[in-house]
Amino acid sequence: MKKEILVLGAGTGGMPAAYELQAALGNKVHVTVVNQSEYFQFVPSNPWVAVGWRTRKDTTFSIRPHLEKKGIDFVVGKVEKIEPGGNNVVLSGGQVLSYDYLVITTGPRLAFELIEGAGPSGHTQSVCTVDHAESALAKLQEFLKDPGPVVVGSFQGASCFGPAYEYAFILDRHLRNHKIRNKVPMTFVTSEPYIGHLGLGGVGDSKGMMESEFRNQDIKWITNARVAKVTDHEMFVEEVGADGEKIREHVLPFRYSMMIPPFRGIEAVAQVKDLVNPAGFVLIDEFQRSPAYPNIYSAGVCVAIPPVEKTPVPTGTPKTGYMIESMVSAIVKNIEAELDGKSPSTKGTWNAICLADMGDTGAAFVALPQIPPRNVAWMKKGKWVHLAKVAFEKYFIRKMKTGTSEPVYEKYMLKALGIEKIAK
């Protein structure tokens, strides 16, 4: 009898997980993917969608035909409940799916409700989903007719800072293209202790590089920031000192704002006792496995990772694309070991490669591993990064359509650079 493997989520973790599981274990398992929507969205392109440089058609595609072509079942539905005791997942509408192994790659819940007035239903925009990016674009088009101050950044509780930086620079370039940048004072607000921290304690000279870029583009900033509330056209920001105590208050007027929200675990996952931490993120051991439920694995933004260091405003650790793929590859190896009657023993490297667009240039960093102390850490800037990000968008979307999560040439090219997914 084939083992049933259920993958929750079809994003940058779930799609590669399904493909790798099917490729490695196809004759031993039956893989089913559950996702709340019919389409895959390439989230790193959303900052471009939010200024009209990309469209939904450019960055999304229908999931079903690509998974089914590989013999993977696809179910569209919202997960209402996980029942680890019975190895079941209950979907809205009452459909029950049973599993031998559950792989949770849901991504986060966007917890706008934690800050009064935050989010597209409030007074700030988001680039965390393609729907949010399209909403941000509509608001931006209104803003361009009557420009004024802009606030961009990340609320406390966010654990993904790169898109905020990208959007600040992309918006800056967009406003210059429209020749109205001189009418738009820009302020960057973040919970990070310094510009370029990125939730990683910095990478290479990220602090100096990003501060220099902000000065060059005339973008002001406030760090160690807690946003108390957002009202129509005003953001109330508390700046704290090294001890976490408030040292000053800022009332920032704005006519347009994009802020990355706090992240939490999705409700169906967060309500499972012993599976998650207080924020609803999945607790995992070194093999990506739940300590409480050994047949549950997890990868991506939904896993619990401690902060890299204590900061005045608690700052989450981001989970970048290649790091997530590293987690996924470890999961596949460990499930394969279990099916062969062995104990899980494979660990992901959690290496990180990041390409951040900055409008007409960009910044790239490599952190091996992502969590310090590191063997390698560097950050470089140049127009080549912008071009590389454009190329990577096309490459990754094609990779997800063809069902090859790691083509041979990618594997050996990265290996030659000392970048691997599996720890030796």
Image (spheres, helix red, strand yellow):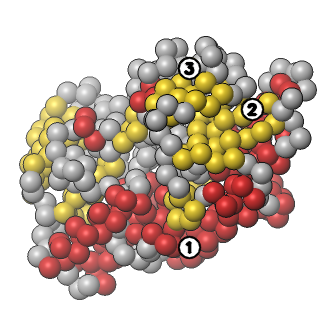
Q: Amino acid at mark 2?
A: Glu
> For the point 19% across and 77% down, which residue is it?
144
Q: Amino acid at mark 1?
A: Val
Proximity of marks 2 and 1: CB atoms separated by less than 8 Å: no
Q: CA distance from mark 2 to mark 3?
A: 15 Å
Where does label 3 land, which residue? 83
Q: CA distance from mark 2 to mark 1?
A: 37 Å
Q: Amino acid at mark 3?
A: Glu
Rendered image: mark on residue 390: 1
> For the point 61% across and 71% down, which residue is it?
394
Where disc 3 sits, the SS reads: strand
Percent x, y for residue 128? Answer: 40, 53
Task: Classify residue 148 as left or right of residue 214.
Answer: left
Where disc 1 sits, the SS reads: helix
Percent x, y for residue 132? Answer: 34, 58
Q: CA distance from mark 1 to mark 3?
A: 42 Å
Q: Residues within 10 Å of mark 1 (few under 14, many from 20)?
A: some
